[in-house]
Image: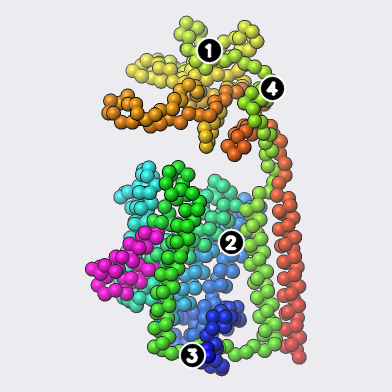
Amino acid sequence: MENSLITDEKPVKTSVGSRIKFFFKETFRPHSKEEYAEVFARGLGANCSEKVARKLPWLYIRVFALNLVLFAITAITFRVARYSADYLTAILFGGLLFNIPLCILFFELYPKRDLSLLKLFAVLVIGGVVSTILITLGYEFIYSTDSEPNAWISTLWVGFWEEFIKGAVAIAAIALLKRKDPLLCFLIGFAVGTGYSFTEDLGYIYSLSRSDGVSWLVLTSVGRGLSCVCSHAPWTAMIAWAYSKFKKPFINFRFYGIAVAMMALHYFADVPFFDDNLNILRGVTVGWAIEAAVVAAIFVAVFFVLKGYFKELYTEEKPALFQPAALDKRARLSQAANVTAVLCAALLSVLACVGCCVSVGNKLVYDKIFSDSEFIAFVQCNLSFNYNLKREYDAGQVDYSQFKSDGVLRGATQKVVDDESGYEYFYVYKFENKDKIPVLQSVGVRLEKLYYLRQMVVFEDHYYTYYGYPPEYPPVDESLWNENDGNEDDGNGDGEEPEETPKPLKVINFFNILDANCGYSMEEDCFEINNGKTEFVGLGAIIALSALAGATLIGGSAAFITLKIKARREENV
């Protein structure tokens, strides 16, 4: 026989299925003004009836729906109009999207209800800002991760420093509030972590979307938002909980054990298992396994903390679980219409976000060429040229042009006419001033004042292309790359093994007479060339998304109007 909880009207079975059904029923049913007032009056000394005070959480889902709609509207508006105001507003709602609803969810779950929402958000904002400032100052003046070449060490510092500062700020907030109830402290720590997560998410969304466009604005907002469930907020919450749970925490090894455990989870969440440059533990399989373990660990920790305290509290107080009175037919129809409108708005928002991520418009079309000689012949229009990258500067020849600084030659151009073809080659020399003596730094070539010699250097997993003239780096001579066995001295006299210099797979010199956009496909091992050709892409995706959006809008509007009319008729009856 199943256990049951006694309510005001009838017992509610406590099986898993009935509890889930009751949870969603409470979430989506209509809520009165008194219930809204109760949420915002918590912790302010207002008298709330027992029936109102024992509701399951419901406000968080409404806040999430509102954030989703506002984020989608600003994101799609920015995609279309490209106004900076829409861009910044979309970033703001992208940071709020998951962080704030999640914090409100835990606020609603807090059973004692003696902390005001205003005070919680004050902790969130002030704690988040103070944590961000202190963490940033630590990176600037104590230890800069940018200067650390070893990603494993820099990540270790990040995990320690961020959790140390957020935990310290949360403990300071607990001291100022003069409350040390473990579950309340858990909520305070969660608010501090949420505040820092929000500011950090804003930075990531801005930096990635600024360079990669609106698609990354949406993807980063969703990705970073989902990660808040098992990252900064619960890590800080667990440290704050441990601080209030154990007596004399600063001399209690269990407090430090939980703090170190949260730092370790932070470390493993950030550790670069996905970095292709690492020689150990690399690969997507290992990386995702580590991430999954971190998520599981924090979920288990939070579950047992909340389970124990809720069980203890409800065992002691034995509250009646409020069962709302049954709605009449008119109210049920009106509520169904409202839920339909919200679900349609949420679905349209999701479709708008997907539309922001779809590539639409004219896209460059690349021709693929697999032969080096065919590539050179193509970009040079089947013309052959005789240039000499090893040509020395001829001090006896009259320069075509030259540049001097402080009386020292810094640059010179010499013209050479090829007797066979009649082409004019202009060799441009750059010099370095060393003790007022010009030392040759680089040599480049251009053809008849118009076409520049360009160079593509292909390695095993990447390639470089040097454009323009004079080049940023001197033209590459393939003979300069020599594989080193690592046993020779590097010439510094210290006996250290020199770093192994990778040898390129190919070095291609070409005059891009077509002025085409040239690249190299590492996956297909071929040259990619675009000579101004484009094609329109994304039309099918836009048609499909528009059809879904239209169907949703029409169907949702029809259902909403129909339900409202039926509700009105019931009222008239």
Residue drawn at (49%, 19%) of the image: 443
Q: Amino acid at mark 1?
A: Gln
Q: Are marks 1 and 2 in contact (CB under 8 Å)?
A: no
Residue drawn at (73%, 79%) of the image: 563
Answer above or below: position of 107 versus 531: below
User: At which x and y percent is residue 131?
Assistant: 37, 60
**Stretch of the chain drawn in magenta:** 237-266
- Give the image quarter of residue 533: top right
Real-space Cα separation, disc 4 to disc 1, in angstroms:
25 Å
Label 1, on which residue? 414
* Residue sticking out furthest to the left: 251
Describe residue 559's horizontal placement relative to residue 299 as left or right: right
Q: Is residue 357 visible?
A: yes
Answer above or below: position of 82 versus 250: above
Which mark is first along the chain, 1 or 4? 4
Q: Amino acid at mark 4?
A: Cys
Q: Secondary structure at mark 4?
A: loop
Q: Is residue 243 magenta?
A: yes
Label 2, on which residue? 71
Label 4, on which residue? 381
Real-space Cα separation, disc 3 to disc 2, in angstroms:
39 Å
Q: Secondary structure at mark 2?
A: helix
Answer above or below: position of 479 versus 398: below
User: At which x and y percent is residue 464?
Assistant: 53, 32
Q: Can you say which quadrant of the picture contains the C terminus?
A: bottom right
Q: Label 4: few (<14), some or many (≥20) within 10 Å?
A: few
Q: Is residue 346 magenta?
A: no
